[in-house]
Image (spheres, rainbow, N blue to C red):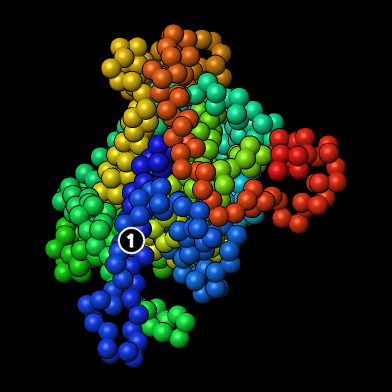
């Protein structure tokens, strides 16, 4: 999710590649000692793993084209890795969008977000940075979205109160249940649509580099940290449906991701007219999926044997798997998401400005991911034009997500970048295949509806781990900061604590803001109830105004970490050139002056 997390992940990935790459062959030669058939595990350090051999340490580098069947298998693996993070977003938004009980709407949202994620992945790998990087929904948009939907105007009506239809109350005008949630998601669509223009402008104008000069770890740490901390209520509500099942989900994820992370399972493959057995880190790659499926299976068995309460008023009822079974039966076999499917997006200034905080946070994350992805795919450090173009395409992706109505934007996925180092396959063709798979599977309505049957406590257990990781990633940025400095401790403590206190107070006292201008009241409410905006704003301002050296602020070490280990690569800068138009750009010097296009002189 962020550069610092990636740096730690990449070191681990390269150190563990020896175990991953161990293979042995089953041949007819019986004279060989069976115990010596297994190759000695490689113990290359990070520096050795990056040494400039003709093929490097990769099986397939960024420009290579693996066989079609391998592209499908590895592409599906990337789909599964991103599955948990993408699925979590519509499930988080279900309640504030007033579709908690509307299974059809949830199924359509799930189909839409997977479809758009696949579309944006194809755009990024073909026209953006051209790195093998997967695009999916982002948690940085969740906080401002929840702040917008928490406004009195957009709060869900109390269904138990059965209000009378009133000509003056906006909520009461929505007689149709579908219109009840569509009017809310149209507001989110409009906010993301306009706010994403900022990301597009930052990329096309080349202003990204200028903005990043003023952003250091002390601004990023509270921003990312508060994204995770602000979602503790959603995690608690889901887990509280059955703490035993939620705890089991957490334990299974820890079991597979940590305790069994170094256990590689033997798998068999046929290559070069021989059967080969290779060790594969199955538990490490699919820990979240295995943990979720294990708890889901237990809930199914408990439901089947009627061991869970059958009354909605009893504790533990929401752990049953048959509550939303009708959603699978009623879902269409084929569902094609299309732009404007929920209606024309609505735009308000307050919502747009609140969403811009999410856009800036997403931009910062993605730049770190580009360097990490280049490091693992055998590509050189991404040049400025590739970074600018990647940010611009992410802006286009967020605009497309807003037009389709996924309720979210798109960003780069870190867990998929780490998988490049484990599989040693850095081909962009594999990620393009993953994008196609996401589009195709997003078209099957019943496939998306199956995930609605996941019980709330299982989702809550996933949230506990995922949101905790998001918060920890924010804290990890502090490894380059001098934490013995009272300056830094003051900035960090105040920005983080303010990001918790102010939103809580504004949520508890919504009527205290009354400037006489309705739009200004809404703007203040959205900005001051967005945790990451408060933390990031105070961190940014204080870090850039209170005197301190670059070493003290951690900026010098942080920049070194970005470029660490990037000197060794298996291809040149041409891998970042746009397809089919390199010669055309070379003819016109004016085009080469654009900050998002490659310059012949630079190359």
In-front residue for pair 236/179: 236
Total labels: the figure holds 1
Farthest right residue? 587
Q: Quadrant of residue 470?
A: top left
Residue 383, position in %: x, y? Answer: 62, 40
Q: Residue at x 46, y 69 (%)?
A: 73
The answer to whether one can see residue 250 in this image is: yes
Up the image or down, 450 lies above or below 382; here it is below
Residue 93, position in %: x, y? Answer: 42, 43
Q: Residues within 10 Å of mark 1 (few under 14, many from 20)?
A: some
Q: Residue at x 71, y 35 (%)?
A: 595
The answer to whether one can see residue 312 in this image is: no
Up the image or down, 45 lies above or below 191; here it is below
Q: Quadrant of residue 41?
A: bottom left
Residue 468, position in %: x, y? Answer: 29, 39
Which image quarter holds the N terminus?
top left
In-front residue for pair 543/510: 543
Up the image or down, 206 lies above or below 466; here it is above
Residue 495, position in %: x, y? Answer: 37, 18
| Residue 256 falls left or right of residue 344 | left
Q: Residue at x 38, y 17 (%)?
A: 552
For mark 1, what is the residue? 42
Up the image or down, 572 lies above or below 591; here it is below
Q: Residue at x 46, y 32 (%)?
A: 560
Which image quarter holds the C terminus?
top right
Element marked by disc 1:
loop
| Residue 130 falls left or right of residue 418 | right
């Amino acid at each position: 999710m962020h550069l610092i997390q990636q740096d730690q992940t990449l070191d681990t990935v390269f150190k563990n590649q020896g175990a991953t790459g161990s293979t042995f062959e089953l041949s007819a030669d019986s004279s060989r000692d069976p115990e010596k058939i297994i190759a000695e595990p490689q113990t290359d350090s990070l520096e050795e793993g990056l040494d400039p051999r003709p093929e490097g340490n990769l099986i397939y580098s960024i420009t290579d084209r693996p066989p079609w069947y391998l592209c499908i298998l590895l592409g599906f693996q990337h789909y599964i890795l991103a599955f948990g993070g993408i699925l979590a977003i519509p499930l988080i938004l279900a309640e504030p969008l007033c579709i908690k009980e509307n299974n059809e709407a949830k199924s359509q949202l799930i189909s839409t977000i997977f479809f758009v994620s696949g579309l944006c992945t194809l755009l990024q790998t073909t026209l953006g940075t051209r790195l093998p990087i997967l695009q999916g929904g982002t948690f940085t948009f969740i906080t401002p979205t929840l702040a917008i939907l928490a406004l009195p105007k957009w709060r869900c009506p109390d269904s138990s109160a059965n209000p009378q239809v009133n000509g003056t109350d906006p909520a009461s005008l929505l007689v149709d249940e579908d219109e009840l949630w569509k009017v809310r998601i149209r507001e989110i669509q409009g906010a993301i649509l306009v706010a994403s223009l900022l990301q597009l402008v930052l990329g096309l104008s080349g202003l990204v580099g200028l903005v990043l000069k003023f952003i250091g770890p002390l601004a990023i740490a509270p921003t990312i940290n508060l994204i995770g901390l602000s979602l503790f209520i959603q995690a608690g509500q889901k887990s509280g449906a059955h703490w035993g099942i939620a705890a089991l989900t957490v334990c299974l994820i820890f079991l597979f991701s940590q305790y069994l992370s170094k256990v590689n399972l033997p798998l068999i493959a046929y290559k070069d007219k021989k059967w080969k057995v290779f060790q594969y880190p199955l538990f490490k790659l699919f820990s979240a999926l295995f943990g979720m499926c294990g708890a889901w299976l237990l809930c199914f068995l408990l439901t089947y044997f009627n061991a869970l309460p059958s009354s909605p008023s009893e504790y533990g009822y929401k752990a049953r798997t048959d509550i939303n079974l009708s959603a699978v039966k009623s879902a269409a076999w084929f569902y094609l998401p299309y732009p404007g499917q929920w209606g024309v997006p609505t735009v308000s200034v307050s919502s747009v400005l609140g969403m811009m905080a999410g856009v800036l946070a997403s931009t910062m994350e993605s730049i770190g991911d580009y360097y990490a992805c280049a490091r693992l795919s055998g590509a050189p450090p991404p040049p400025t034009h590739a970074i600018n173009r990647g940010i611009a395409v992410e802006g286009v992706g967020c605009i497309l997500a807003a037009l389709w109505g996924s309720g979210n934007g798109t960003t780069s996925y870190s867990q998929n970048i780490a998988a490049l180092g484990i599989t040693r396959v850095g081909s962009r063709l594999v990620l393009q295949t993953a994008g196609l798979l996401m589009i195709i599977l997003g078209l099957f309505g019943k496939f998306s509806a199956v995930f609605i049957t996941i019980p709330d406590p299982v989702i809550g257990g996933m949230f506990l781990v995922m949101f905790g990781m998001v918060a920890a990633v924010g804290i990890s940025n502090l490894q380059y900061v001098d934490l013995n400095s009272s300056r830094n401790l003051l900035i960090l403590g105040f920005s983080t604590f303010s990001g918790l206190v102010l939103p809580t107070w504004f949520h508890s006292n919504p009527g205290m803001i009354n400037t006489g201008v309705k739009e200004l009241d809404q703007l203040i409410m959205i900005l001051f109830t967005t945790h990451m905006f408060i933390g990031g704003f105070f961190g940014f301002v204080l870090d850039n105004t209170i005197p301190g050296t670059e070493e003290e602020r951690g900026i010098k070490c942080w920049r070194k970490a970005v470029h660490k280990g990037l000197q060794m690569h298996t291809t040149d800068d041409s891998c970042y050139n746009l397809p089919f138009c390199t010669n055309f750009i070379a003819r016109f010097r004016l085009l080469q002056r654009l900050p998002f296009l490659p310059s012949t002189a630079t190359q």
